[in-house]
Amino acid sequence: MLTVHYLEKSRAHRILWLLEELGLEYRVETYERGADYRAPESLKRVHPLGKSPVIEDDGQVVAESGAILEYLLARHGEGRLRPAIGSAEWVRYLYWLHAAEGSAMPPLVMRLVFASIPQRVPFFIRPVAKMISVGAIKSFIDPQLRTQIAYWSGELAQGGWFAGQDFTAADIAMSYPVEAALSRLPEAKNNGRLVAFSEAIKARPAYRRAEDRVGAPPASHPELFQPRSPKRSRTSAA
């Protein structure tokens, strides 16, 4: 049976959601985060990078969210949750399936990292570190995020979903950056199209079944998006 190696409160929720949409049987191997919210070393026994999500299917180990989504649809999708190959919607689908991690998430992660820097340096240089961090966020990261959010909103205006009028796996992929933005950015919270998208995905029965099985997805856990104290343990894997 297909196995999902699931790190709690992680992006792996999207994989379970896809499996529920496809009606596939699977088992979940759950891993708890350490005190510093990092993954445990045991995940490295599944994949060398020790990251989640990872799946095992008939002895094949597949990592990376976008690759897992493509793999599952190619092997088990039977044409579902993706537009017809060669169509205009398919081109948009391919873009958003990979833009989720390739373009959308990097500035969100950068914002989190820069926001945490002042708490991770010696106290006597924290004022300087804070000045640098705030400057980078305001002058470089937030303008990128505002551009991203405007782009997301414009794409959703064309049909309600990222690849047109039909729900696809691209929407599953983009759910994480959209929810992450909604959890911390006023520009996202005040964007009606992003809010409507969030409400639409959460209303899907498959989304709720995945949530019932492993708990709420990561955007429902604001502690994951807050700077962590450097005094926490750092013995577990990244």
Image (cartoon, grey):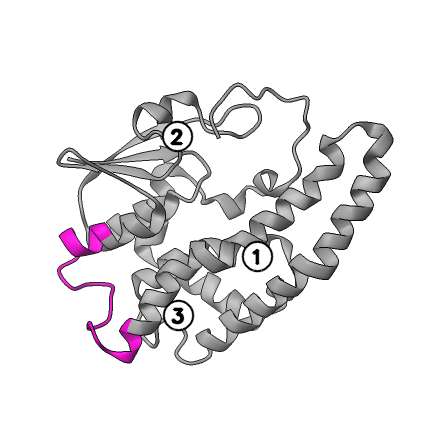
Sequence order check, earlier mark of 1 and 2: 2
Instruction: Please report the bounds of the magenta region as a residue range.
Output: 71-90
Residue picked out by circle 2: 50
Name the quadrant containing residue 202: bottom left
The residue positioned 69% from the left and 39% from the top of the image is: 116
Q: Residues within 10 Å of mark 3 (few under 14, many from 20)?
A: many
Residue 73, horizontal then vertical, whole percent:
20, 55
Q: How far is mark 1 from mark 2, CA to CA?
A: 25 Å
On residue 90, the disc is none
Tag 3 and tag 2, C-beta contact below 8 Å: no
Residue picked out by circle 1: 181
Tell me the kind of residue under disc 2.
Gly
Residue 12 placement, left or right of 223: left
Vertical placement of residue 180 versus 231, above or below: below
Residue 10 within the magenta-colored segment of the rendering: no
Residue 208 placement, left or right of 220: left
